[in-house]
Image: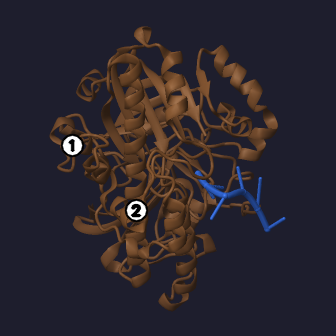
Amino acid sequence: MGIPKAVDVEVVEEAPFRLRVPAQGDMRVDGVVFTSHELLPDPAEDGSLQQVVNVATLPGIVEASYAMPDVHWGYGFPIGGVAATDVERGGVVSPGGVGFDISCGVRLLTADLDRSELPIERVMDGLDRAVPRGAGSGAVWQLSGRAELERVLLGGSRYAVERGHGEDRDLERCEDGGVLAGADPGQVSARAVERGLEQVGSLGSGNHFLEVQAVDEVLDDVAAAAFGLAPGQVCVMIHTGSRGLGHQICTDHVRIMDRAMRAYGISVPDRQLACAPVESPEGRAYLGAMAAAANYGRANRQLLAEAASDVFERVTGQRLSLLYDVSHNLAKIEEHEIGGERRRLCVHRKGATRALPPGHPDLPPALRDAGQPVLIPGSMGTASYVLRGVVGGGAFHSTCHGAGRVQSRKQAARAITGGALRKRLEGQGIAVRGASARGLAEEAPEAYKDVDAVVAAAEGAGLCRAVARLVPLGVVKG
DNA sequence: ATGTGC
């Protein structure tokens, strides 16, 4: 990606955890970063602030080019970036604003068990056998061919439930009821299909994981009760996405848009911001393929959750119950008020989570009073969080998605060996299963920001409220 | 993130 452009931008701390970059040059709106100077990555090593500036030049962008407290350098857009464009006023959609792992997200399940009564080693041994992971193929489901894959692309978690992998209640506990509308399998290339056939129900690698966790601390009694969370309670968190299929779709459509941009008279400061009007053949094609990948990612998490639940039933006699499933890499068409008018916007969230406030009509009745659960996976061996949306929030009802990297994978692998890290985790009482030594080292906690500080910043910025802090008991990694 | 990389 090269060396970051030396940024010479004015950054104004206008409120605690709210830095503003006033529009200058080609910027159509200001940049707003919900963080402190301490959490902001060093511009000499990380290009994310420049990327916030670049995104502000996109046609049709409204309000501001936003970034969350876990912001860091990504492909075109920063990871932690939120940007909305006005569909009826030439607004664009950009695959770089979603990222390569389309619909990467998190699912949290609860067990009716206290950590003191959990036979963790036996559960971990069961999960070790039941959870396909690592690069390449190997998955819970074997699909018969393109026709069946298309049902996954159109149906998401709903199709998995129809096939007996879960129950109807699960769908109420998924963003969009488990299936994103508008999927168009016709826009998914043969190569993406080929990669997707053998990966439905697989974790992948990198920062993806399945963790057995316990509630360490309840921070909002009322919301925690509504979410079914109590101190000491055992939970399972699954963090994964759309695997090779989503990656291939992003690759394909970046190329298509890179070629098409000129015809629409669009110029961007970075080719990685390749984009096209939402209402153009290329824009619609991408959004159709993206929705297909989103549904693939949801079916993926549904199948892994069922596999984990089967293990819990065998070992403890209890199945798991779905608290919620969120995506943190997606562009969605949503209505928001801009300058006193309801507008149709294309909201890109890349490494950012939708966080609907209490009372929002899109929430299921059981969650409507408390607000949308927001699931924040911490880095390996550190805490994770459950947050909730708040009235008044900001950035089109969005908040952070995780700790956010501060070291590259290469830097992290240089700093520690996988073996040493495994020993350290086991010394902390965290069971580790099936991780490659290299993969483990790349995910060392010191390669990430402090998740407690990120959550404090998101709360301090008024984007969300913390509901519970979770700590890991065991981790399954690719 | 990714059948991991100029």
Residue under pointer 1: A168
Chain identifier of the blue chain? B
Q: Looking at the picture, how far across and down is residue A8, in whole percent?
A: 68, 61
Do callouts 1 and 2 point to residues on the same chain? yes
Q: Nearer the viewer, residue A318 or A255?
A: A318
Q: Quick one: which residue is furthest to the front in this view?
A: A144
Q: Nearer the viewer, residue A252 or A382?
A: A252
> What chain does mark 2 sit on?
A
Left or right: A47 with respect to A78? right
Q: Quick one: which residue is furthest to the top in this view?
A: A116
Q: Looking at the picture, how far across and down is residue A461, in whole percent?
A: 43, 40
> What chain does mark 1 sit on?
A
Chain identifier of the brown chain? A
Badge 1 amino acid: Asp
Q: Nearer the viewer, residue A72 or A160?
A: A160
Q: Residue at x 30, y 49 (%)?
A: A175
Label 1 crowd bin: few (<14), some (14–19), many (20+), radius 10 Å: some
Q: Quick one: which residue is furthest to the bottom in this view?
A: A263
Q: Quadrant of residue A475?
A: top right
Q: Earlier in the sequence, mark 1 or mark 2?
A: 2
Q: Residue at x 51, y 40 (%)?
A: A402
Q: Looking at the picture, how far across and down is residue A330, in whole percent?
A: 42, 58
* Placement of A111 over or under A59, stated as above or below: above
- Element at badge 2? helix
